[in-house]
Image (cartoon, helix red, strand yellow):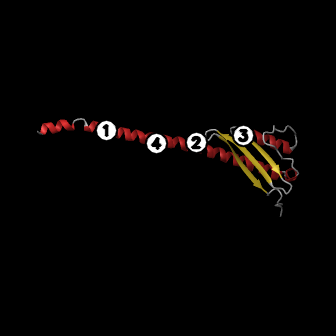
Amino acid sequence: MMSNAKHKQAGVSMLEVLVAILVLSLGLLGLGGLQATGLRNSYSAYLRAQAAQFAFDMTDRMRANRQAAIAGSYDLAMNASAPTGTNLPDKDRAEWLALLGNLPGGDGSISVSNNGTTRIVVQWNDRRSATDQTEAATLSTTQLVVDTRI
């Protein structure tokens, strides 16, 4: 009678091993998905940080040439071609647009309103994101009109 019970148990441990392998492989697939999502989000954050840095770079350039910035010499429309002039605002804008070329589909615009409020927009295509859309970072500041001299 005991030998009959042994035959009923044959192969059970093999089935347990197969179930354990299935559970482990599903877990590893989940970890792979998390890794891919983390990489995609990390790249999106990198692009956003680059865009913010580029916007602050242009703000610093405009502060260095405050009178020309307030006069509107730094204004730039989205999708505009790089200026070819030899004056400082044209050189700054051309260099800035070249920097934006480091972003995928990078472009930007600059506008200074009558009250001195500056609005800088940097946009790029975040094609690795889940939505594959154009992203934009906007920096608005009034620091160009503030006189920081003591």
Residue 70 percent coordinates (x, y): 86, 53
Q: Earlier in the sequence, mark 1 or mark 3?
A: 1
**Residue 101 in which image quadrant:** top right
Give the residue number, with chain letter if any, for mark 1: 17
Q: Amino acid at mark 1?
A: Val
Q: Dot 2: what SS?
A: helix
The residue at the far left in this view is 1
Residue at the disc numbered 2: 40
Which one is in front, 102 or 116?
116
Query: Which structural element holds mark 4?
Result: helix
> Which label belongs to residue 30?
4
Badge 3: how crowded within 10 Å, few (<14), some, or many (20+)? many
> Residue at (14%, 37%) from the top-left corner?
4
**Front residue of this view, candidates 74 and 6:** 6
Label 4 amino acid? Answer: Gly
Question: What label sits on residue 106 in the rendered view?
Answer: 3
- Disc 1 secondary structure class: helix
Separation of disc 4 and disc 2 at Cα?
A: 15 Å
Q: CA distance from mark 1 to mark 3?
A: 52 Å
Q: Amino acid at mark 2?
A: Arg
For residue 5, above or below residue 145: above
- Provide residue 78's location: percent of width, then percent of height: 78, 42
- The image quadrant of residue 132 is top right
Question: Going by the picture, which residue comes out furthest to the bottom?
Answer: 150
